[in-house]
Image: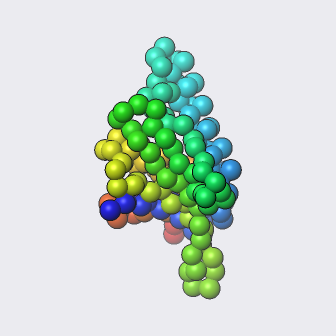
Amino acid sequence: MAQSAYIKFVTGSLVPALTLDELKEKLLHYREQLSLTAKQLGWEYDEAGFPYTIETKPEGEGKWFYLKGINPLYKYIVIGVGSEKNQEEDRHYVQVVLPDDATHGDKSKGNEFCKYLGKLLKAELHLFNGRIMYFNPRK
């Protein structure tokens, strides 16, 4: 059965919602940061740190895209955006889905990307195992 993690935008989050294009920009920025780290270390870390290409399909246009693995240790991760009703207001989120045939590497990278985005956007992160991490400022 597929597993999902959610990055929920709550009160105190940096942004109220993200579009797919903005989400892709955040992932590309993450990859760029890895390549700069790789340059400093003198090691091609960016391919190990982000072993995916960003792919889209016509049926997912405007709703989701997926990260396709570039080596056998990684298959793919599906990422989409959505919203839900929460006490009379829309609450937007990013959903990260591990399909049934995802590898352990995909799950590790999925957790890594979720934590990066959650921290960057000061959001509430619901991990694949059901645990919640709060990166948003709370009183």
x, y percentage for residue 59?
A: 61, 58
Seen at 48% across and 27% down, the residue is: 47
- Report how many numbered discs are placed on residues in the image: 0
Question: Quick check: 95 above or below 34?
Answer: below
Q: Nearer the viewer, residue 13 or 113?
A: 113
Q: Farthest residue toward the bottom?
A: 88
Q: Nearer the viewer, residue 90 or 119?
A: 90
Q: Nearer the viewer, residue 137 or 10?
A: 10
In the drawing, does residue 72 fall left or right of residue 69?
left
In the drawing, does residue 3 fall left or right of residue 113?
left
> In terms of image quadrants, where is residue 74?
top left
Examine the rendering and report whether any part of residue 133 can be seen.
no
Q: Farthest residue toward the top?
A: 42
Question: Quick check: 10 above or below 46?
Answer: below
Seen at 51% across and 44% down, the residue is: 67
Seen at 58% across and 43% down, the residue is: 55
x, y percentage for residue 19?
A: 67, 57
Seen at 68% across and 50% down, the residue is: 21
Tell me the colour scheme of the image.
rainbow
Q: Nearer the viewer, residue 84 or 13?
A: 84
Examine the rendering and report whether any part of residue 139 can be seen.
yes
> In terms of image quadrants, where is residue 76?
top left
Q: Farthest residue toward the front?
A: 58
x, y percentage for residue 15?
A: 66, 60
Question: Quick check: 77 above or below 93?
Answer: above
x, y percentage for residue 37?
A: 52, 25
Image quadrant in which the N terminus is located: bottom left
